[in-house]
Amino acid sequence: MKNLFLITVLVSFTMCLQAQFLTSKLNSNDYVTELTSQTYSIENTTAGYWYVIAPKIAPTAQMVTVKLDSIAGDHTNVAVQLQGRYNSHSAWANVGSAVNWTGATADTTFNIVNTTENGYRHFKLLFTGTGTGETQISTLFFKQWNGTF
């Protein structure tokens, strides 16, 4: 019985890791992380996400910049949602609304801006594609700040 439980936990853990394509950790003095040297892909209906750990003492507002490019097939939509949580034991909450890219253009760059300060220390930028296709992510930029934008 213990072996069955252990195998189930390991399989679940492995499945969760497959969706995460990148983790970034900011120091307590950092407010920006930018990743443009490598591209990441979203395939078919498998969601992927960028996980950012940002330990700040004071509440912050956030901005994320994303560049998407359709490289194969037909993603009918890619939803990009910023989520946050206070620590690794709390539940994820949506920060603002998802941005939906319909793939109608060859590529697109957009910002998700949250001007309401929150106390989240963990962020997840979730990418969910629908349809059959492959979308490339070539720019990821995360910024947080105290006070007005």
Image (spheres, rainbow, N blue to C red):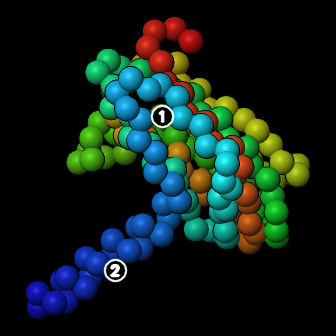
- In the picture shown, does residue 48 fall above or below 12? above
- SS for callout 2: helix
Residue 12 showing in the rendered view: yes
Does the CB distance between marks 1 and 2 fall below 8 Å? no
The image quadrant that residue 39 belongs to is: bottom right
Mark 1 or 2: in front is: 2
Considering the image in quadrants, where does the C terminus appear?
A: top right
Comes first in the chain, label 1 or label 2? 2
Residue 119's label in the rendered image is: none
The image quadrant that residue 52 belongs to is: top left
Residue 99 showing in the rendered view: no
Residue under label 2, please give it: 11
Neighbour tally class for label 1: few under 14, some 14-19, many 20 plus, Cα within 10 Å: many
Neighbour tally class for label 2: few under 14, some 14-19, many 20 plus, Cα within 10 Å: few
What whole-number distance in Å separates the C-alpha atoms at marks 1 and 2? 30 Å
Q: Amino acid at mark 1?
A: Val
Q: Amino acid at mark 2?
A: Val
- Measuring from the top left, give residue 20's x and y in whole percent: 48, 60
Residue 95's label in the rendered image is: 1
Q: Is residue 7 left or right of residue 12?
A: left
Instruction: Work out whether residue 85 or residue 131 is closer to the camera in this orientation and state it.
Output: 85
- SS for callout 1: loop
- Measuring from the top left, give residue 121's x and y in whole percent: 34, 34
Instruction: Work out whether residue 93 or residue 26 is closer to the camera in this orientation and state it.
Output: 26
- Measuring from the top left, give residue 16's x and y in whole percent: 40, 67
Instruction: Work out whether residue 100 or residue 145 is closer to the camera in this orientation and state it.
Output: 145
Residue found at x 35% / y 20%:
59
Residue found at x 46% / y 9%:
147
Considering the image in quadrants, where does the N terminus appear?
A: bottom left
Residue found at x 42% / y 67%:
17
Q: Hey, which residue is sitting farthest top in the picture? A: 148
